[in-house]
Image (spheres, grey):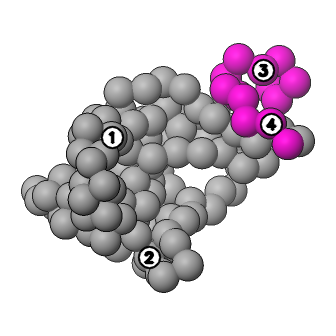
Amino acid sequence: MIFIGGLINAKAVAHYLQTRREDVAIVACGTRLGAAVEDLVGAGAIAASISHAAFSDDALAAIGLFRGRGWRSLVKRGRVATLLIDLGFEKDIEFCLRLNSSSVVPGLVGNRIIDVRRSRRLG
């Protein structure tokens, strides 16, 4: 199953993944131009919220990036945020930087995205 997580729901996604007790891969999506700092920081936030796990070097690097004191300003300086700010979407950036502000755990089921915590079929 594919789950969707980031800064706004990092703890909720991490908690849900831990309840499933399965091996997982946290993928920082990026763009066709390469890695996106906001995706790396978001992946680090999710991984940092998972206890007692054996992490890959990539995951450890993402956790380190997230745990750095300047991750918010770093995200705002990234290419995607800079583009969105230039287009007038600065409030959207601020919304996306609200760490753990959502408890929703989106997941792809068939061709639909649902809150998997509310689905009875996923146990």
Badge nearest the viewer, 1 or 2: 1
Q: CA distance from mark 2 to mark 3?
A: 32 Å
The kind of residue tagged 3 is Ser
Which tag, 4 or 3, sits closer to the chain's start?
A: 4
The kind of residue tagged 1 is Asp
Give SS at disc 1. Answer: helix
Q: Is residue 116 magenta?
A: yes
Which residue lies under the disc numbered 2?
A: 35
Q: Is residue 24 above or below residue 18?
A: below
Left or right placement of residue 76 versus residue 44 in this view: left
The residue sitting at 31% across, 71% down in the picture is: 79
Mark drawn on residue 92: 1
Q: Is residue 48 visible?
A: no
Q: CA distance from mark 4 to mark 3?
A: 12 Å
Start and end of the magenta stretch?
111-123
Give SS at disc 3. Answer: loop
Q: Quadrant of residue 58?
A: bottom left
State the image coordinates of residue 89 (x, y, percent, origin top left): 30, 46
The kind of residue tagged 4 is Arg
Count all numbered tags in the image, as a single digit: 4
The residue carrying pointer 2 sits among few (fewer than 14), some (14 to 19) or many (20 or more) residues within 10 Å by Cα, namely few
State the image coordinates of residue 20 (x, y, percent, origin top left): 70, 38
Give SS at disc 2. Answer: loop
Which residue lies under the disc numbered 3?
A: 119
Which residue lies under the disc numbered 4?
A: 112
Q: CA distance from mark 4 to mark 2?
A: 26 Å
Q: CA distance from mark 4 to mark 1?
A: 24 Å
Which tag, 1 or 2, sits closer to the chain's start?
A: 2
